[in-house]
Image (spheres, grey):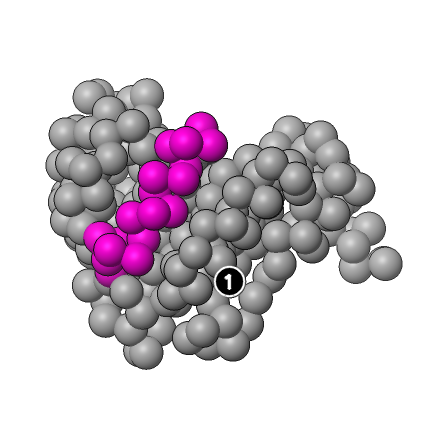
Amino acid sequence: EASLADYLGTYDSLGVSRVVIKARDAETTHGYRVTNEAVAEFCRRHSPRFIGLAGVDPNKGMRAIRELEHAVKELGLHGLNLHPYEHQIPISDPKMYPLYAKCIELEIPLNLHCSTSFSTSAAMDCGHPRHLDQVMMHFPELRVCAAPPGWPWVLDLIGVAWRHENVFIGITAVRPKYLTVEHSGFGPLLQYGRTVLQDRIIWGSA
């Protein structure tokens, strides 16, 4: 309880108005899960600052779709969180498509890991932005926050966001000081974030 009080107090001291809490389900590949129920309960106890996103495992097929619908309609969660590398499939894998369609049906956004990962159990290509481009061609109504912001394929993700107006780029899990480091790969985010994509860059501290 003391640690929780310190955690909540940090947001008070910083004046943070909104915090996104994400459920995750990687039971079929890694055997772990942060349940939708736990996230929903935490958000209820500490609202309105905390916004909960559901997490489901696309490898579970129809069970995952039903869990997503339950999480939104019954538990009150506000979006879907997916990390395809945890499921050892690319963003454009057919297993993901029913979940994308369900997001549109439920009118909820998708937070999608779109970058490399440090998991060596899945190919780093799972998070390549070109897979997101394919998805958006099939589901143009899908609202996506692609985060982290595409490294080492930052320009590719910028191209995808420029092509598809419902793709937002989330600058999360990147220390701000690294955004301006020469040759870090993040420079284009600042350039395009000041110009053509200035309304579609979302910052989060992670």
* Relative image position of residue 117 (x, y in whole percent): 32, 65
Name the quadrant containing residue 161. top left
115 with respect to 64 (left or right): left
Residue placed at 55% from the left, 72% from the top?
Answer: 32
Above or below, 126 relative to 205 = below
Secondary structure under badge 1?
strand
Residue placed at 60% from the left, 61% from the top?
Answer: 34
Residue farthest toward the front in the current orientation of the protein: 62
126 with respect to 21 (left or right): left
Magenta: main secondary structure equals helix
30 with respect to 50 (left or right): left
Query: What residue does disc 1 label?
Result: 25
Q: Nearer the viewer, residue 4 or 82?
A: 82
* Relative image position of residue 67 (x, y in whole percent): 54, 51
Q: Residue 63, can we see it?
A: yes
Say if the magenta span includes residue 140.
no
Say if the magenta span includes residue 91.
yes
The quarter of the image holding the N terminus is bottom right
- Give the residue type that dot 1 points to: Asp
Above or below, 34 relative to 66 = below
The magenta span reads: 90-107
